[in-house]
Image (cartoon, rainbow, N blue to C red):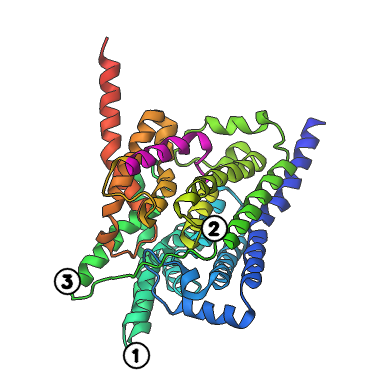
């Protein structure tokens, strides 16, 4: 009898779970069409496609909030269609990757600049003689370097931009997956944004070569303030929807959720595979809610929701299915906030530090594995290091915080291990 009930519950989870991402596409598109008239919406969307996309660019400033959300809806729809067409199961990695695709469509990715990167990933799979499904998530994550494609579109004259866009995008999609396979060994699974770490090195190489040829990547800061209410309601709908879906699937009491918090979050920590869909969806709502609550707490200091900040919240929400939960993100965020408070060179409400407090949660496994103190140290170091990494790749790596987090791991993990092994040796 119990087996039958469990089987029924599993069958009931599947359509709800697989429906979350298409529902998110619909929500994003609905908010897009409500935010702007159709003619203005399409014009704004076109402007996003043909504009610079490096750090830090708010597409809501470029084309309007509606156009930015339409771009996010279309990028997410394409990404979801690719994953679903390959008949892959919906796992925590699926949510982490596709929520990042939606989020970073509000911070640099667009429907045009990701296409050459996807082609490069497909060609890499063919080169390896393996199905594209094996590399689809790494390829989607690799679109973090897609601003390079937009850079050539904007800054090269005439038709020269087209071969440059294709070559650079294909190279990114082709080379990031093997680099990512190596960088994961460096941070040992403690940087959840592993592809950001790998892309940082590739971006560093590309930026260095281009600088030697006389080409420097320069992106003008675009930071919106005017669409706070639109983005606030969007996040409310998304987080509430995830919470209700989790409750519907059976996570109705604290004891249904709290076992998930026992995980350190170290990769690979796929909460859907380990704990099921219901507590994972609730965890996504709670974790994203923490990010939103932090930003709203800064409202009296002039902080307003915009594309990049919504990107942060959606990224936290997605990775709450693949390593993050309230217990392991809060120490890291606290350490980053402490750094903001103590360091004069880090303005409290400047765009970079605002993003860093939320993105530093990519180091959550350090807090989960080694405790609150080391989690705070990781967050503190992340806040200081990330201020100096964007210049290395010219702002072309949208996952700059993932790059910085990887460097924190390389610096901090040997120290932690040395001190822990020393303490074990002492009588």
Image spot of residue 269 (x, y percent): 50, 40
Residue occupying image coordinates x 59% and y 56% = 232
Residue 172: image quadrant is bottom left
Q: Is residue 29 left or right of residue 68?
A: right
For the residue pair 348 and 241, the one nearer the viewer reads as: 348
Q: CA distance from mark 1 to mark 3?
A: 23 Å
Image spot of residue 156 (x, y percent): 31, 83
For the residue pair 340 and 164, the one nearer the viewer reads as: 340
Quickly name the residue at label 1: 158
Disc 3 to disc 2: CB gap under 8 Å: no
Can residue 290 be seen in this snapshot?
yes
Residue occupying image coordinates x 42% and y 45% = 362
For the record, the magenta segment spans: 320-341
Residue located farthest toward the front when viewing the structure as drawn: 300
Relative to 363, is 168 above or below? below
Q: Mark 3 or mark 2: name the one nearer the start of the chain.
A: 2
Residue 326 painted magenta: yes
For the residue pair 346 and 166, the one nearer the viewer reads as: 346
Kind of element beneath mark 2 = helix
Quickly name the residue at label 2: 98
Main secondary structure along the magenta-highlighted residues: helix
Q: Is residue 357 left or right of residue 7?
A: left
Residue 42: image quadrant is bottom right
Residue occupying image coordinates x 30% and y 59% = 390
Kind of element beneath mark 1 = helix
Kind of element beneath mark 3 = helix
Relative to 245, is 6 above or below? above
Q: CA distance from mark 1 to mark 2?
A: 34 Å
Quickly name the residue at label 3: 212
Q: Mark 1 or mark 2: name the one nearer the start of the chain.
A: 2
Quarter of the picture containing the C terminus is top left
């Amino acid at each position: 009898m119990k087996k039958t009930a469990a089987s029924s519950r599993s069958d009931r989870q599947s359509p709800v779970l697989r429906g979350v991402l298409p529902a998110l596409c619909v929500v994003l598109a609905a908010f897009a069409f409500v935010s702007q008239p159709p003619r203005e919406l399409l014009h704004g969307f076109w402007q996003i496609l043909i504009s610079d996309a490096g750090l830090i660019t708010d597409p809501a400033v470029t084309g309007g909030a509606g156009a930015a959300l339409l771009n996010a809806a279309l990028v997410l729809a394409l990404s979801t269609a690719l994953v679903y067409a390959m008949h892959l199961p919906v796992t925590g990695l699926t949510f982490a990757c596709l929520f990042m695709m939606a989020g970073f469509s509000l911070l640099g990715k667009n429907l045009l600049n990701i296409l050459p990167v996807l082609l490069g990933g497909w060609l890499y799979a063919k080169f390896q003689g393996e199905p594209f499904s094996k590399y689809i998530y790494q390829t989607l994550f690799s679109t973090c370097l897609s601003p390079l494609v937009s850079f050539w579109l904007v800054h090269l004259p005439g038709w020269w931009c087209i071969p440059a866009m294709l070559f650079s995008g294909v190279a990114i999609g082709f080379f990031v997956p093997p680099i990512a396979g190596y960088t994961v060994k460096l941070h040992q699974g403690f940087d959840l944004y592993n592809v950001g770490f790998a892309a940082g090195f590739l971006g560093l190489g590309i930026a260095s070569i281009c600088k030697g040829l006389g080409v420097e990547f320069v992106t003008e800061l675009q930071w919106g303030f005017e669409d706070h209410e639109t983005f606030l309601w969007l996040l409310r709908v998304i987080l509430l929807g995830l919470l209700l879906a989790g409750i519907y699937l059976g996570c109705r009491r604290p004891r249904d959720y709290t076992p998930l918090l026992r995980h350190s979050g170290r990769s690979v920590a796929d909460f859907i595979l380990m704990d099921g869909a219901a507590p994972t969806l609730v965890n996504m709502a709670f974790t994203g809610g923490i990010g939103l609550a932090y930003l709203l707490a800064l409202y009296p200091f002039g902080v307003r929701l915009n594309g990049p900040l919504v990107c942060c919240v959606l990224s936290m929400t997605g990775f709450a299915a693949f390593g993050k939960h309230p217990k392991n993100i809060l120490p890291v965020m606290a350490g980053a906030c402490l750094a903001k408070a103590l360091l004069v060179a880090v303005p409290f409400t400047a765009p970079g530090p605002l993003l860093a407090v939320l993105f530093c949660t990519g180091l959550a496994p350090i807090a989960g594995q080694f405790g609150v103190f080391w989690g705070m140290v990781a967050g503190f170091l992340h806040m200081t290091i990330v201020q100096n990494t964007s210049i290395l790749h010219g702002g072309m790596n949208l996952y700059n915080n993932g790059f910085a987090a990887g460097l924190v791991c390389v610096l901090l993990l040997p120290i932690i291990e040395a001190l822990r092994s020393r303490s074990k040796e002492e009588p």
